[in-house]
Image (cartoon, coloured by chain):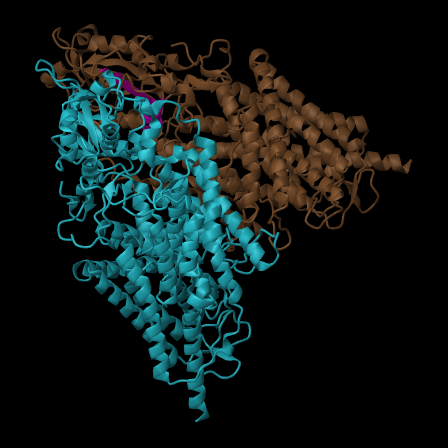
Chain colours: A cyan, B brown
Amino acid sequence: MKGVFGILCEFGKVAWWWWWCRCGVGVACSAPEEAVLGSACRSPRSAFFRIGQMSNVDLDDELLDPVSARLIPYPSPLTTHPFLLWGCRPAGGGRGAPNTKVVDGGQGQAEQGGSRRGRAEVTILVLFLVFREELRSFAIEALDIDKFTERGGLSFSLLLWATLNSAFVLVGSAIVAFVEPVAAGSGIPQIKCFLNGVKIPHVVRLKTLVIKVSGVILSVVGGLAVGKEGPMIHSGSVIAAGISQGRSTSLKRDFKIFEYFRRDTEKRDFVSAGAAAGVSAAFGAPVGGVLFSLEEGASFWNQFLTWRIFFASMISTFTLNFVLSIYHGNIWDLSSPGLINFGRFDTETMVYTIHEIPIFIAMGVVGGILGAVFNALNYWLTMFRIRYIHRPCLQVIEAMLVAAVTATVAFVLIYSSRDCQPLQGSSVSYPLQLFCADGEYNSMAAAFFNTPEKSVVSLFHDPPGSYNPVTLGLFTLVYFFLACWTYGLTVSAGVFIPSLLIGAAWGRLFGISLSYVTGAAIWADPGKYALMGAAAQLGGIVRMTLSLTVIMMEATSNVTYGFPIMLVLMTAKIVGDIFIEGLYDMHIQLQSVPFLHWEAPVTSHSLTAREVMSTPVVCLRRREKVGVIVDVLSNTASSHNGFPVVELADDSQPARLQGLILRSQLIVLLKHKVFVERSNMGLVRRRLRLKDFRDAYPRFPPIQSIHVSQDERECTMDLSEFMNPSPYTVPQEASLPRVFKLFRALGLRHLVVVDNCNQVVGLVTRKDLARYRLGKGGLEELSLAQT
Amino acid sequence: MKGVFGILCEFGKVAWWWWWCRCGVGVACSAPEEAVLGSACRSPRSAFFRIGQMSNVDLDDELLDPVSARLIPYPSPLTTHPFLLWGCRPAGGGRGAPNTKVVDGGQGQAEQGGSRRGRAEVTILVLFLVFREELRSFAIEALDIDKFTERGGLSFSLLLWATLNSAFVLVGSAIVAFVEPVAAGSGIPQIKCFLNGVKIPHVVRLKTLVIKVSGVILSVVGGLAVGKEGPMIHSGSVIAAGISQGRSTSLKRDFKIFEYFRRDTEKRDFVSAGAAAGVSAAFGAPVGGVLFSLEEGASFWNQFLTWRIFFASMISTFTLNFVLSIYHGNIWDLSSPGLINFGRFDTETMVYTIHEIPIFIAMGVVGGILGAVFNALNYWLTMFRIRYIHRPCLQVIEAMLVAAVTATVAFVLIYSSRDCQPLQGSSVSYPLQLFCADGEYNSMAAAFFNTPEKSVVSLFHDPPGSYNPVTLGLFTLVYFFLACWTYGLTVSAGVFIPSLLIGAAWGRLFGISLSYVTGAAIWADPGKYALMGAAAQLGGIVRMTLSLTVIMMEATSNVTYGFPIMLVLMTAKIVGDIFIEGLYDMHIQLQSVPFLHWEAPVTSHSLTAREVMSTPVVCLRRREKVGVIVDVLSNTASSHNGFPVVELADDSQPARLQGLILRSQLIVLLKHKVFVERSNMGLVRRRLRLKDFRDAYPRFPPIQSIHVSQDERECTMDLSEFMNPSPYTVPQEASLPRVFKLFRALGLRHLVVVDNCNQVVGLVTRKDLARYRLGKGGLEELSLAQT
């Protein structure tokens, strides 16, 4: 009788603690679980506070105007849901533009100092805002949960637990599904696309940041198998993109600062730096952050950019250390590690030998296969979701279902577990006794109740024998499927930490088996294998190598394991790539984004620019009737963002390319009514300046909003002064890889194709190139858009 | 009497040891000083062994053939000495070439696997060969030098010492000056140029490697203030470039392997990877090596290249660790650090606080100023050398003089020093008692007798009070001028370690002063300031930031100091850049190399392609007379490497650009006599293949060696099939930054300038662009060449 009572009592304790720490969120931010939240614990309040604080955040990247919205590549079968189809448009073009005479004057000087300064501020703000609340939750973590016990039935506990989880996930999912669908997921694919030059509407908006931060808090509180690192990277990018613009559309204020940065290229550089700062803060890995930005993002690399990104990362780490030093009490000691610290692997005690290299490679193979399985399952799941779960309310229901299932499964596992471990020498924060003897705790419960980060550390560093193989096996299995089901839900959630946790679990299991086989040899420390397993699993899922190696090295403060980690990651990538793409690339492809990879498909040498280009192209003349321009811009068929300008056509001579003018420039010209006739009549008060173009960035008004009278339609516009007089061109015989290289190296958005008389024959856009990819049966042509 | 005898005895010991360890080189490789040698202790034998071993090293990059030798940019006043003027030619062009129909077929597939494999081998070989001997010298280091004493007069000791040093330097300098002048210096400027796309003859030849390795051994043995890291990086690059070609011209053998890599771009990638592997091995810094390659070298960055470089670096570290593990006895433990390990800075005991940030920045300023002084002195010295010391025998004499002065100064300093330190707790390897009491050693002697690497470690880690401030001050002063005088001598020598040593010395002095001022506060550990001083000094001299930060972090196994090190390096760079360029850039500029920086000068927006281009351009027609082609190639005035191919000109129509053909392609075509008439007559046995071009790479025969009979001169050649049909072009109105960007992003060597009818109006070459740089008084036009 006493035993049953004890059990109930224990379960009640669990339930209470669960309930208490979850309910505490809105009230006092007081539970250990909040340590996971990362971004901002007192979510709604702090988020709103942030709006006031960061009033210079720019809410750009609006949904496209009706004309250019045509460009949104809705793939044929999947045309329903705005989240699903991020609604992206090829962008990234600033690089091609600023050679116009107007723009050419005097740029370049401001670049260095200002931009560096800007980025430093960015990162300081990122950290100060994002981690202040985290620290507060850390502070309250020390409270003793044992005080909060409640007695209740077993089923009541389960019900309470599952219901509460679902409720939190309901809110978290609802705000994402109904308010800002682009805030779903980890945000890394979206940032990748953004850095690749594809503008995804809303992705760097303040609203997205608010929803993302609130959403990830609610997901984590809701007990889902998610991490907060991806969202943190996304948040860093949003803040960087926002601050760099020096104004806020939502607050209708322009601070008249950082006007220089109101260009696509500058903004993209800021986003790179923000992402690096996010990684740097999340893992305490400044160099890893730089390499992450380079590997995953920055398409247009140069030394200065790297420099700045590195500076941002370092400032980010420094600020984090400073804040943590205040929190830890030793206020001036800046030697704290990153936010997530996998614990130091001491070289003295844990060494590896050359015998283990094949074992590590084998683990890489396992990681690659498991990663491929994860991705394949997630692929089918995502396809299923695209087909059947495209209404927001269905998405919310699915998220709730996952939360309830997660809670139930964890409950059942804990209930059925008999794995008791002694309390002494254990790093478990909230040991739960359950069925165990006094002085012992249930290790399955620990695995589920610890924050995922702590579970990873515990798997890495707990002495051999801390985990029962059966517990590890069950936990791996269950967590694998839960994490796979969770990724892609309409909630804000990252995949880094769950992957690491799965990997650490099976890695430790592997290590334990190995020490059984070898008779507990001294070198078979399970913690080392947990590390390698974590690397293998994460590498198998996301397929990063360079940056991940460095991140793992920095997070474990250990240079020695660099080589085996690299081997493992490389093996996992190679093995995984045989079966299926990486998770992020897979999701990017599922969204039919015109994403340009690093190189053209190898079999595309036979294709020429002529076969790839869009034709016919609408060309404008140097002096063009206003009516013609308005018609061209209003015409939904000519949806390009750039128009070649040709010579005044007379019949004797062919129309040779003279320059290129952008849609946005035309709109600004129309808005300011820069017509030849008005200028002749002295009606134009002042010359148009570079500033007029920058002020309009990035939301050029739609053509419909510009009123042009019938008289004005008869006027002419002289485009010579504003066009780019020497656009990059390519002859029509150029091969696809050549065109691709030009696009990639220069970050173009459109490239004029000319014949050997310099006459315009077509226009290659990003979409024309992204259409071709290497499939199983050779070169495939995707249907990216309806153009 | 006993005192004097003791003194003489001690000096005799010094002299003996000095003599013994130096003489030992040729005989038994037995002295502690050999630990410094780094590359190969038993130099001549091991170098020859290497020739047999690495018979697939390619000795390409020959001195130019008479025609293209015209391209060597001999600057007007400085036309004498081949070392001085490396005799470089713009190269780097492969990127522009392989779009010809012949070349286009089937490339791309072999790329990944093969190249990665190749690089792995490269690095394994690098390490195995370069460090095996180093290890042997390490092994014998343990011998007790106290056994080897000899009694002699003070002046005799000095004389012996100075003479022996000079003798070694004589040999080291003579082989460099007379055999291979390009092996002088650290090799990093040369590698930078090579990676930038400027071919410097001999720079990646086997002969250079042999001379470099022997030379650096002799310089170090000769007691010069030099390091071996630069030469090690250069050696890595040479081996990488050699192996990748799969054949050796010196051994007249072609192994028929790696034929795919016989292209400029592939070779350059290998050189990048080799340099990274060199850094990785030298400092145990694989990530730092990658960043070094990226920051200093790779102009044309992409993800795959970074991947491969990283892989090479990792393999390099791994191999080093493996070899070291064998040496250290614990054969399977792969956890050893790099070859030069600055000792672990333990985060627990050595922390830094936010108060110290301004101090670090101040140190950065000092480092920047001292670095600028160093560079300025070296600049004047180099100018002096260019003017007056251009004959090899003078150069050898100067090197000997420096060696003698170095020995004398060290001798005098040691003699006059009264800085005695207790033996206990000291890390000095060869304590010399001299005038000190028993149980003490002379710390000035320690600073001069230790290897520079060990001195650095000792300055970093010895407990407070180990060094007398006067000793440090004197040492800094003397070593500063010695190092400055030494760099630029005609010997193989690096500047990394001397810079670090100077910086560590004044940094420690700074730290000691600080602890005097603050009353020996606990945070004022002089070792920390020695580290910062070393970073500041090195940063002030070479002006690297990103890679140096990471290298220092990895070499000290400490992530925490990353931020202050970065701050220090950045400050040093900014301060130094106010006064003078970095040392490497300065030397590159002194050699008048057409080196392209990252971006065009900021004030160059007003220049257009028309003003920059070379004109008139020699064009060829699609079907051209053989005689015309031979004349064009023989004509020294038309010294370009690429010729635009235009339409068959009739009078009515202008000659439009049809393609571009390279000098090397024309030569191969002429050699194989691919004439239309012969082909019509069935005389051409087989079609020319890609292989024919690759086999000729990189030493295309000079035009004079190809015999063309008078009959053959009347034949015609059809260039359509071999030319690049879609060369990159630029309109004549394009601004210089635009042209520059195209060059830099695509790695071009020539760019055709066309008017808006697609007629050729000029050709922009690398030299045309490198001519413009931002001087004190705005944009300056350099006279790089006589073309």
- Residues A229 and B123: in front is A229
User: Residue B24, percent across and down?
Assistant: 65, 35
Q: Is residue B226 above or below residue B777?
A: below
- The image quadrant where one finds the N terminus of chain A is bottom left
Closest to the observer: A760 or A47?
A: A47
Residue displayed at 37% across by 71% down: A475
Instruction: Quadrant for the C terminus of chain A, please.
Output: top left
Image point (29%, 37%), residue name:
A92
Q: From what the image shows, is residue B613 above or below residue B197?
A: above
Q: Quadrant of residue A185?
A: bottom left
Above or below for B586 versus B44:
above
Relative horizontal placement of residue B22, taking residue B564 as reference (left or right)? right
Q: Is residue B201 visible?
A: no
- Range covered by the magenta-colored residues: B737-755
Give the camera-side residue of A77 and B340.
A77
- Residue B745 among magenta residues: yes
Residue occupying the point 34% across, 83% down: A155
Q: Residue furthest right?
A: B1
Residue B234, percent across and down? Answer: 48, 31
Query: Would residue A250 appear left or right of A760 to someone viewing this image?
Result: right
From where the camera sits, is residue A706 visible? yes
Residue B460 horizontal/vertical position (percent):
65, 44
**Compared to A578, does B712 lie above or below?**
above
> Which residue is the extreme one toward the bottom?
A1
